[in-house]
Image: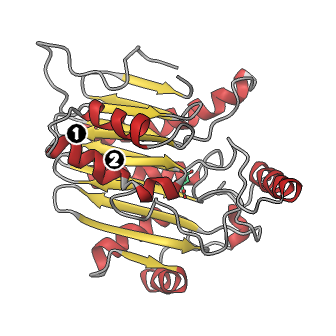
Amino acid sequence: MVLPFVLAGCKTAFGSPPPTWSIVIHGGAGVLSKNTPPEKVKEYEDALIKALNHGRDRLAKGDKALDVCESVVRILEDDPHFNAGKGAVYNEKGEHELDASIMDGSTLRCGAVAGVRTVKNPIGLARRVMEQTKHVLLMGDGAEQFATTQGVERVDNTWFDTEHRKQALEEVLRERQRTGLVDVQTPPHTYGTVGCVVRDQDGHLAAATSTGGMTGKRWGRVGDTPVIGAGNYADAHVAVSGTGTGEEFIRHVVGHSISARVQFGKQTLDEAVRAVVFDTLKPGDGGVIAVDQAGNMVARFNSEGMYRGMADSTGRVEVRIYE
Ligand code: ASP
């Protein structure tokens, strides 16, 4: 759904004023097949529009990039359609282990949690790691104990359950048994993730990303989402959030690579994102969303689709799933 039409990655038209704020969101690069009934597709579009509108309204009234990113990701975490918070995928043991991180581009302050099991909104805990500790990343039991000291909302691990994710796990496990390959995946159900990148009216950038990881992942596996510089990154030049096969995003330090291309390589945001998504990563690995200092917005992917939306102060609004 495009309201009205805008090309991902295009620059502000010559002569038109640059945007005073910009926001891009994603709901993961593991999308429904193109044969999915339109009413099902609409559910995902509506979920994206709800989160995007929330971010848009907050930015229009001058709220800060970091606050907007966190609250938009919370909305997406609470939505069972996406692989983060409620609706997170299952690991190989049939449980949920959640990862999240948040980064403030103007100060490089950041916080992350990995492998949390009872925190309703992992992005909120990541923010508390950033603001209440001198650390960047807390994992497992230590992160859970920190959540207790912070009084954040807790739930039983089964609260994250959904039928469609259970079926996806069963499919992956069946496929592993059939092929004898322990790490086989059955795209597109295997990943998802949610993310938000923002440039606010003060010109500050921020990024937030949250995920349940990959379906059937090994117990204890940590992906790129809580790894600052890989699946989530913001500095004074760009803010980036990724979705896809986390191991590849970690190997290629995707978020920071995009920043380095812009900062040192003098590439435009779109050139930098295209180079990383289409040349560095392999087809099917996933995609990224990004904004830069000038408020340019980009969403690119090398998978079949990516749930995504973008909006800025000039009135551009777009929500899309496929190409
Ligand atoms: N990147 C996430 C991970 O590997 C998965 C995803 O994007 O869906 O944990």
Which residue is labeled 1 in the image?
A: 292
In this view, the residue in front, 166 or 122, is 166
Q: Is residue 277 left or right of residue 163?
A: left
Residue 184 in sight in this render:
yes
Q: Residue at x 51, y 56 (%)?
A: 246
Q: Is residue 134 left or right of residue 223?
A: left
C-alpha span from label 2 to label 1? 9 Å
Q: Residue 70's quadrant in the figure?
A: bottom left
Q: Position of residue 229 (x, y in %)?
A: 33, 59
Residue 153 in sight in this render:
no
Which residue is labeled 2 in the image?
A: 240
Q: Position of residue 240 (x, y in %)?
A: 34, 47
In this view, the residue in front, 14 or 177, is 177
The crowding category of the residue bearing disc 2, from other C-alpha atoms within 10 Å (few below 14, some 14 to 19, many at least 20), is many
Question: Which kind of residue does numbered mark 2 sit on?
Answer: Val
Q: Is residue 132 above or below residue 285?
A: below
Q: Residue 25's quadrant in the figure?
A: top left
Q: Position of residue 317 (x, y in %)?
A: 38, 24
In this view, the residue in front, 167 or 123, is 167
Q: Could you tell me which secondary element the residue under label 1 belongs to? A: strand
